Image (cartoon, rainbow, N blue to C red):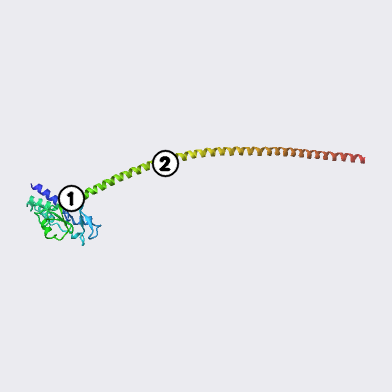
Amino acid sequence: MMAETATNANDLVTCPMCLNVFDSPRSLPCGHSFCLACIRGHCKDKPPASKSFCPLCKQNFQVPGDGIEELPTSNHLRRLVDCRSNCRLHTDEKMNLDSGELKAVSRRLRGVHCEKHDDQLTTSHCFDCLENVCSSCSETHHKKHRLKTIETLAAELKQQIETDIKEVSSRVADIRNDAERLNTKREQFIEDVGRQETAIRQKGEEMKTVIDRKVEELLQELDRIKADSISPAQTAETRLQQTADDVQSFCDYSQEIRTEGVVKFRVMRSKLFI
C-alpha cells in the first residue's frame, strides 16, 4: 500500500512536459499544471494578454498581462512536492497525505473538482477567467462573468468538432481529387513529352538524310567541276610543252645552220686569197 501510494505521489508531482518533479508549478484554467520554466518556454512567442493553449488538452487560455509568472501557483502541487521531499529526507516518517486526499488532489489537478471548494464538482466554465468553477463560485465570485455550463459547452464543442471533422474530411476528399487530377495531368504531360521527343528524333533523322544526300550531290558536282577543269588544263599543258619542244628544235636547228654557215664562209674566203 505504501509503495502504491508513493508511486501515485510521484506521478502527481511530475511535470508532464519535462517529466521532472515540479519546480514552481503554475496552473492553467483547464486545471493542468506545469513547471514555471516549462510553461514559460511553451509561451515564449506569445506576448502578454495574447492567446495560448494548454500543452495537454489544447484548451485556450490568456497569457497574463504581466507575464507567465502571474499564472496562479498550484498550492496542492507545491504541498505534494514538499511532502515528497520530506518523505525522501525522513524515510521513517509516513507521508502526510492519505490515499483519499491523494485522490482528491488528483481530481482537482484534472479539473474535475473546484479549486476553491474541494468537495464540489465544477459545473460551469467562466470565459472571463478561463477556468472551470463550481456552482458556489458561479453564484459568488463569477456571478457577473460570462458563464456557460460544462454540459452546454461540451455539447457545443462536440458539435463544433463534428463540423470541423466533416469540413476536414471534405477537404481531404478534395485534396485527394486534386492529387489525382495532378497525377493525370502529369502522366499526360509525360506522354506528350514522349511524343514530342519521338517526333523530334524522327525529324532529325529525316533532316540528316536530306543533308547527307545534299552533301553527296555537292561532292559529286565538285568532282565533275574538277574533272572538267583539269582536262582543258592538261590539254593546254600538252600543247605548251609541244610548242616549247618545237621552239627548242628550231633554236637548235638555227644554231646548227649558223655554225655550219660560218665554217663554209671561212673556207670560201681562204680559197679566194689563194
Residue pointed to by mark 1? 155
User: In this picture, is 111 found above or below 201?
Assistant: below
Image quarter of the C terminus: top right
* Residue 26 in view (yes/no): no
Residue pointed to by mark 2? 192
Element on which disc 2 rests: helix
Question: Given this view, does label 2 or label 1 mark the residue nearer the observer?
Answer: 1
Element on which disc 1 rests: helix
Q: Which residue is drawn at 29% across and 44% down?
A: 173
* Residue 261 in view (yes/no): yes
User: In this picture, is 63 found above or below 230?
Assistant: below
User: In this picture, is 54 found above or below 65?
Assistant: above
Q: Residue 248 in the image: state x and y as whole percent.
A: 76, 39
Q: Residue 221 in the image: state x and y as whole percent.
A: 61, 38
**Residue 246 falls in which quadrant of the image?**
top right
**Residue 216 falls in which quadrant of the image?**
top right
Give the residue type that dot 1 points to: Ala
Q: Earlier in the sequence, mark 2 or mark 1?
A: 1
The residue at the far bottom in this view is 66
Of 137 and 41, the residue lying toward us: 137
Of 90 and 273, the residue lying toward us: 90
Give the residue type that dot 2 points to: Asp
Q: Which residue is drawn at 12% across and 49% down?
A: 8
> Is 205 on the left-hand or right-hand side of 57?
right
Q: Which residue is drawn at 49% across and 39% down?
A: 203
* Category of crowding for the residue at label 2, using alpha-carbon neighbours closer than 10 angstroms: few (below 14), some (14–19), many (at least 20): few
CA separation in Å, label 2 and label 1: 55 Å
User: In this picture, is 87 found above or below 253?
Assistant: below
Q: Residue 4 in the image: state x and y as whole percent.
A: 10, 47
> Is 210 on the left-hand or right-hand side of 262?
left
* Category of crowding for the residue at label 1, using alpha-carbon neighbours closer than 10 angstroms: few (below 14), some (14–19), many (at least 20): few
Of 18 and 155, the residue lying toward us: 155
